[in-house]
Image: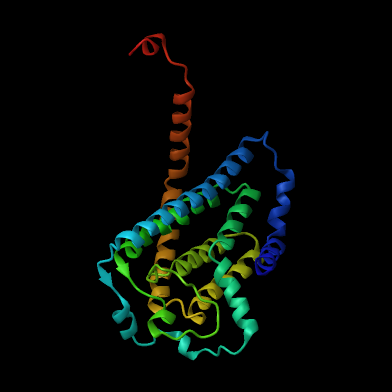
Amino acid sequence: MELAIILLIFIFVSRKDLLELRSFSLRKEKDKLVLMLGFGILGLAFLVAGIDRFEQMFEIKFHPEILFLNDWLKSIPLNDLSVYFNYNRPIILKILRAVYHYGFFVPVIFLIINAVSRRDVRGLSMLVFGTFAFHYTVHFPYYFFTEGHQIWCVKGVAIPLFRTMSPLDHVFPSMHASMSVTALLLAWKQPNRAVRILYTIFCPLVIFATFYLQIHWTIDAIAGAIIGIAAVEFAEYATNNGWLHIHIGRISDLRGLFRRPATKGLSSRH
């Protein structure tokens, strides 16, 4: 139910962009290109998620952590903002639980859909280089080699609200924060004013939810925000230097190589 409500909000706000899909045609080269890029970004997300699951299994079995952060996290002043919140309002808990759950991927998914709808190749390039692959690549060393528990686990206080019961210790830096900052900065480049307003409200709310639900420390969000800004800067650099077109050209050449029939000389070799 919560996901349906969030999706309806994003659909309503993005309706101006989504209506442009009515003129979409696979007979047009640009339409085919943006569709390929959109599905490519989603495929990249699934690939990264699969690698992440494999990495999690490896961690659980072999415990490669060499840095243990709990004492450091507890020692930083004002690092636990959850002590300032009131947890006696079920409706707030329900809203923030949903925002935390779905705020990781829904904003990025709609940025992809909107970019495809507008035939925005530059926007899709920014998403290729600034979202899933970049974030997991940067976060991976921290998650693989460090151990840091969520606030509720360190404090040992299970207040009656949603909890992320994970056997892993992926708390620093916050990927919810990094992805939210990246989505916000990319949304601010959108021509649709309503989209910019929605992301300005929703993305910071995702970060706030991680504090409220006793998941992330303040330093986690700060580090995640820095990564989110770096992701957009990297995406700008890659896009301005035409990396997307270079990679598309290489993929096209590779496809052509596999489709090319073997010559007589090559086919007779053993």
**Which residue is nearer to you in this view: 55 or 123?**
55
> In the image, residue 137 lies at what x, y percent?
38, 56
**Which residue is nearer to you in this view: 45 or 53?**
53
Q: Quadrant of the N terminus?
A: bottom right
> In the image, residue 269 lies at what x, y percent?
34, 12
**Which residue is nearer to you in this view: 231 or 169?**
169
Identify the residue shown where x is 67% and y is 36%: 26
Left or right of 93? Residue 82 is: left
Q: Is residue 242 visible?
A: no
Q: How is the image coloured?
A: rainbow
**Which residue is nearer to you in this view: 36 or 49?**
49
Name above or below for residue 267 compared with residue 141. above
Q: Quadrant of residue 257?
A: top left
Left or right of 67? Residue 114 is: right
Looking at the image, which residue sits at the far left?
A: 66
Looking at the image, which residue sits at the far front?
A: 61
> In the image, residue 262 lies at what x, y percent?
43, 15
> In the image, residue 74 lies at what x, y percent?
34, 84
Q: Quadrant of residue 13?
A: bottom right
Q: Quadrant of the C terminus?
A: top left
All told, the count of numbered labels is 0
Q: Is residue 107 visible?
A: yes
Identify the residue shown where x is 57% and y is 41%: 36
Identify the residue shown where x is 46% and y is 70%: 177
